[in-house]
Amino acid sequence: MSTTTSRRDTANAAAAAETSSGWIAALRSGLDRPLTSYQLVIGVTGLLLALGLVMVLSASSVISYEQYGNSYSVFAKQALWVAIGAPLAWLVSRLPVRMLRWFAYPALLGTLVLIAMTYVPGVGIEVNGNRNWLGFGPLTIQPSEVAKLAMVLWAADLYARKDRLLGDWKHLLIPMVPVTLLVTLMVVGQRDLGTALVMFAIILGMLWFVGAPTRLFAGALLVVGGLAAFLASTDAERVKRVMTFVDPFADMRGDGWQAAHGFFALATGQFWGVGLGASRQKWGTLPEAHTDFIFAVIGEELGLFGTLVVLGLFMMLAFTGLRIAARTRDPFVRYASAGITVWLLAQAMINLGMVLGLLPVIGIPLPLVSYGGSALLPTLIALGMLCAFAKTEPGARAALDARRARRGQRWRRR
């Protein structure tokens, strides 16, 4: 009896191992296909955009009705931005890499001018204490959002030109660090600490991918940490935010209100959530429910499961960006892909950390999910670039041409 059972267990274990190895082989085969990165960028972007539209509609319905008398007003604006941004991303994905490189210097200079304009009295617009907006008639834009993309493009083009000289620390740091720090400090001057932190992450990420020594990062982190602490201590509003971060429930009816109600939303959702559209916190108790704190509404309505899906999608996007950077032979594509990945992942992690109470509430949107056209358009353009970069992987261009040829043959047969 025991011998028969032992043989059966052995056979079952062998079958399980064979099944597991089959799944692993299938996964490896899928990842080795030349169009995997291209399809992953499109798929993950589409899923995050769709989730963002649904959650913006749900999270903004109450405040939209209160402000505009229509529960769909905010959602309609976001849908319009998606309708503008998606074709732009598609157009960018069709451009050759050399043309994308051509935009590097004009984009950087243009964003520097726009950021400088926010300092001009009567031109810059102050929102929530940050003077980081410009108004052009009915349209308002946030130049610092475009500056993230411009920094990545310019630094990638610079490092691609210096690719063989990057062993020398002078070429590694100059002029990249002074120029990007200038842009970042101009954003700090707008009192937009959240965007500045993302820019610091982009700078450090680009330096990491070009092979800067580890000791440089230790010093940079100390400088950035000290600068952040100094900036926080010089502004009464930032001091309140830091104290609220330490214990939001100590002043729950004051400065801790937003963080505390974010916790309430996440706790109420449990594993499966209270149901799509059934959030209680969006009824005026959770400020910025459709922008900076949309992740809390996701946790409330879709539960832990929904938040893990969002986290998984961002991890997949990060994996894809780094995969493109690792597989390409073009140095500009390598550095730009890594920079875009660092930018989007850093911004997502700062937003999630803010909502989860791991970071102070500094006001920064969740990429592709939160409401806001100024953040959405540069993000979609960056992802369009990732699609263009994915085509530089070995065999990708030939696979796309073959797929188009097959589609043409099917159309002719009809």
Image (cartoon, rainbow, N blue to C red):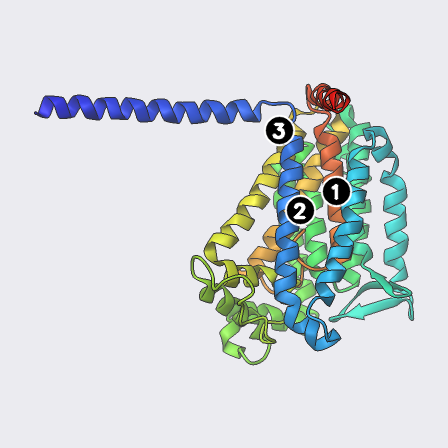
Residues tagged 1 and 3 counted as in contact (Cβ below 8 A): no
Q: Position of residue 104 (x, y in %)?
A: 85, 39
The residue pinned by badge 2 equals 344
Instruction: Give how far across and how far down residue 228 sits, in percent.
Output: 66, 59
Identify the mark at residue 36; answer none if there is no mark.
Answer: 3
Image quarter (top left, top right, bottom left or bottom right) of the C terminus: top right
Vertical relation: 254 (above or below) 142: below
Dividing the picture into quarters, in which one does residue 412 lie?
Answer: top right
Q: Gap in Å between the C-alphas at discs 1 and 3?
A: 18 Å
Q: Which amino acid, by three-letter code, is at mark 2?
A: Leu
Residue at image position (70%, 64%) is: 231
Q: Which of 221 and 333 is in front in this view?
A: 333
Secondary structure state at the residue bearing disc 2: helix
| Marking on residue 382 | 1
Badge 3: residue crowd in 10 Å (few <14, some 14–19, many ≥20): some
> What residue do we see at 73% from left, 76% from top?
69
Helix, strand or loop status at disc 1: helix
Q: Mark 3 touching mark 2, by CB under 8 A? A: no
Q: The N terminus is located in which quarter?
A: top left
Q: Residue 19 appears in which quarter of the rendering? A: top left
On screen, residue 266 above or below 248: above
Above-or-below relation of 377 to 95: below
Q: Where is residue 361 in the image (x, y as percent from the top left)?
A: 61, 65
Categorize mark 1 by other alpha carbons within 10 Å: few (<14), some (14-19), many (20+): many
